[in-house]
Image: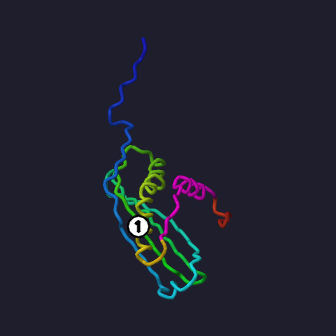
């Protein structure tokens, strides 16, 4: 006689993901050295910073915010600073805590990045500067790097 395993209920181990809304949460553009900056030869130094955060809005409902900050300098002068906070509301259900970290730190930002990239390009062009097309970003690699940094013991900690 063999024992049969009970059938799994339809809701067990079911992973659900949905986009409820994608929106521009905040945008900032500063060109502190205009109009003089337009007289200089355009050889920009570009600094790109990325960040993201997650807020739980309700059961299985999360707001993910991708922050993209672009600072462009000509020599010592700041040509412009553009910051975009691109956000989305996602329904995420049935994932483990580790998987939720990957969803919030990699998967969702990857979905938001094209919208942030477009917003940066538009606002920079409207500021009178050459179009800024950000290169694609590997958010999975950035997330893995973040996990490795967290797992390494701090070198500044002394034990007694």
Question: Quick one: 158 or 42, which is closer to the camera?
Answer: 42
Residue furthest bottom as drawn? 36
Q: Residue at x 49, y 78 (%)?
A: 80
State which quarter of the image contains the C terminus: bottom right
Residue furthest top as drawn? 1
Residue 106, position as x, y percentages in the image: 48, 54
Instruction: State yes or no: residue 37 in magenta.
Output: no
Question: Quick one: 152 or 18, which is closer to the camera?
Answer: 18
In this picture, is 150 found above or below 2? below
Q: Is residue 67 left or right of 25 when viewed as pictured?
A: right
Colour convention of the picture? rainbow
Dot 1 corresponds to which residue? 119
Residue segment shown in magenta: 131-152
Residue 157, position as x, y percentages in the image: 65, 65
Q: Quadrant of residue 148?
A: bottom right
Q: Secondary structure at mark 1?
A: helix
Residue 63, position as x, y percentages in the image: 36, 59
Q: Residue at x 56, y 54 (%)?
A: 141
In this picture, is 3 found above or below 129? above
| Residue neighbourhood size for the residue with mark 1, other residues' Cα within 10 Å, grouped as few (<14), some (14–19), many (≥20) | many
Q: Exactly how many numbered labels are in the figure?
A: 1
Residue 140, position as x, y percentages in the image: 53, 52
In this picture, is 41 found above or below 67? below
Q: Quadrant of residue 151?
A: bottom right
């Amino acid at each position: 006689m063999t024992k049969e395993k009970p059938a799994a209920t339809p809701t067990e181990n079911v992973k659900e993901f949905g986009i409820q809304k994608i929106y521009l949460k905040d945008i900032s553009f500063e060109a502190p050295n205009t109009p003089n900056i337009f007289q200089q030869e355009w050889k920009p130094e570009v600094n790109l910073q990325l960040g993201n955060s997650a807020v739980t809005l309700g059961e299985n409902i999360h707001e993910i915010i991708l922050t993209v900050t672009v600072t462009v300098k000509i020599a010592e002068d700041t040509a412009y600073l553009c910051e975009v906070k691109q956000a989305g509301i996602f329904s995420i259900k049935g994932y483990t805590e580790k998987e939720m970290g990957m969803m919030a730190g990699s998967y969702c930002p990857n979905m938001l990045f094209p919208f942030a990239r477009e917003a940066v390009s538009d606002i920079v062009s409207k500021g009178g500067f050459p179009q800024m097309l950000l290169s694609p970003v590997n958010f999975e690699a950035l997330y893995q790097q973040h996990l490795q940094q967290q797992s390494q013991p701090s070198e500044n900690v002394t034990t007694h």
